[in-house]
Amino acid sequence: MKCFLTSSPMLSDTEELNPANGFIDKLKSSLPDRCNALFVSSDPDDYIHMDRFAGSVKAAFETAGFPFSGFTVLDRRNQGSAKNLVDHADFIILAGGHVPTQNKFFAQISLRDLLRSYDKIVMGISAGSMNSADVVYAQPELEGEAIDAGYQRFLTGLDLTKTMILPHYQMIKDNILDGMRIIEDITYPDSQGRKFYALTDGSYLYIDNGQEEICGEAYLIADGKTTQISALGETAAI
């Protein structure tokens, strides 16, 4: 299996793939000429938004020269066919969205088990990349989550990697949630004894048969400290 676990694969405010850090080149060397794609929803009941999101991703790939033989959205409407859809997909795209909502849907369709023998290409977008980990760090995102004692910050993911990803670092690093700084007051305490890898948009974790490297600008958050480990155009082994 090859995985492209992105912060965001697209250029900001466009329907164009971001070519930075060799992203498009690596995809072209990995995907078949005409692939059957499966877009796994992050909110299985929000058909309108997810169909629109899937359409934007499909358009971006087609514009970059990736034709599809099929492009299916997996959500509540067809979840009973999840195994068949996964088995016949050349390329699985894990949508971005709300991490706990997507994580629950992944569990409902047993996606972790369905992917155990999958040997083709997976791309994660934001939440999809986060939920690809064995143990997922669901950094609080919505108002009230940071102060909710019942909110679970660590979830069981797909086990495509042991690496816990935080996407959109350039956007979230100065955010305030529930009166707290998202990094210093929330994530730093959660990083004690753990490692989180914060990616800026355009960066991604590339996995090829178990070998992992981060491509592009990234930061390691561990034991209450942030250290830059790579810059634009650079790679860092995990």
Image (cartoon, rainbow, N blue to C red):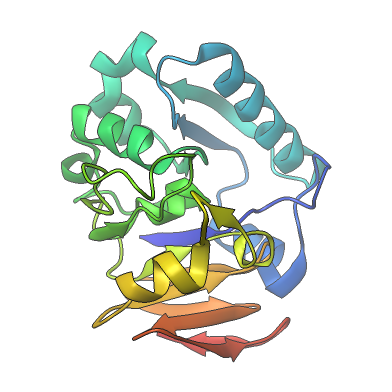
In this view, the residue farthest toward the top is 77
User: Residue lying furthest front in this view?
Assistant: 179
Is residue 78 visible in the rendered structure shown here? yes
Q: Is residue 192 left or right of residue 175?
A: left
Q: Is residue 228 above or below residue 156?
A: below
Q: Tell me where residue 181 appears, x and y as whole percent.
A: 53, 64
- Could you say which quadrant of the image residue 186 lies in? bottom left
Position in image of residue 92 (x %, y %) = 44, 41
Of the 4 image quadrants, the one containing the N terminus is bottom left
Give the answer, above or below, for where 30 lies relative to 223: above
Count of labels shown? 0
Nearer-the-camera pick, 43 or 145 = 145
Q: Quadrant of residue 172?
A: bottom right
Q: Nearer the viewer, residue 35 or 78?
A: 78
Rendered view: 143 above or below 3:
above
Q: Which residue: 51% across, 33% down?
A: 36
User: Where 94 sits versus 185, above or below?
Assistant: above
Compare residues 70 and 124 and report the one nearer the observer: 124
Left or right of 174 on screen, residue 190: left
Of residues 191 and 180, the one nearer the viewer is 180
Quadrant of image for the C terminus:
bottom left
Identify the residue at image location x=26%, y=33%.
Answer: 104
Q: Residue at x 67, y 25 (%)?
A: 55
Return the x and y of residue 184 as percentages of the image width and height.
Answer: 49, 74
Evaluate whether residue 122 shows in this view: no
Q: Where is residue 132 shown, x and y percent of the image?
A: 34, 54
